[in-house]
Image: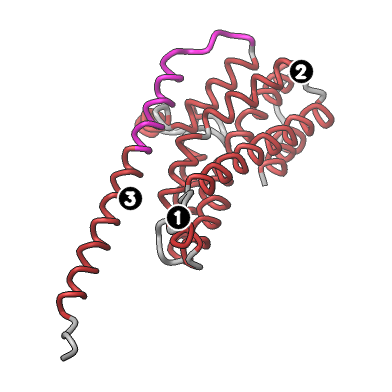
Amino acid sequence: MPIGFYILFTKVMTMGSASEMVTFARSYMGSMIVYSIVIGALFSLAALMQHDRQVGLVQTLRLTPNGTKYYYASLLTLMGLLNALSALAIMLVAVIVNHVALSVGTGLGVLIIAVLGSIPLMTLGVLYSRIQSVELLNVLSNLTSFPLAIISGLWWPLSLLPNWVQAIGKVTPTYLTNHLLTRFLAGNALPTRDMMGIAGWAVGMLILLFALTAWQNMTKVVIHRGSTQETPSVQ
């Protein structure tokens, strides 16, 4: 989908001078890279982890000596590779279709920013995976990903939106990551504010995830104790 959007907006729905279109093709490449991360986090990762919980894989791994640490490490590695491959595919399309000039160093820089910027979104995907209903997860993922793409300026310029929407969009992790990519691709210095914002989102999401996990574990213990006390003893 991100590649389709990229080709649509840069080759079909074109406007402006040749130099403006070159600049737009370069910056919109970053937007679609971020959008691909959103889709991967809220659809692929969330659905995969939800399925693993429902079939009892996570519960089974908790009973093993190594626990779930290798499971989460493998998921982190897998999603990092998928995000990198998605970014590479979009950059390749940008080079072939729109003749965007990218050096190896620039490409590596884009990958690093994309992977680091994906941390808050991946954590959100893990949070969503704790939803029990498959249908509810799908609805919530759609209600999050598409509005988030709009208000953070991934689909079209943020300046087209009302001022109050722009204010909200500029603090989202998707906007911050996209802004970093835009600045980097333009050869400008990376804003410290954006990097701190992404770090803040990552820390906040992780705290929320740990708090939710602790609450769910506590609830299970209380329910288990209650059911044990209500079970009559056999004489």
**Magenta stretch, residue numbers:** 187-206
So how many labels did they put on this image? Answer: 3
The tag on residue 129 is 1
The tag on residue 155 is none
> Observer-nearest residue: 174 or 8?
174
The residue under label 3 is which amino acid type?
Answer: Thr
For the point 73% across and 19% down, the residue is: 17
Q: Helix, strand, or loop for circle 1?
A: loop
Q: Nearer the viewer, mark 2 or mark 3?
A: 3
Residue 115: percent from the left, percent from the top? Answer: 58, 30
The residue where tag 3 is placed is: 213
The image quarter containing residue 38 is top right
The tag on residue 104 is 2
The image quarter containing residue 180 is top right
**Reading the chain from its start, which is encountered first: label 2 or label 3?**
2
**Reading the chain from its start, which is encountered first: label 1 or label 3?**
1
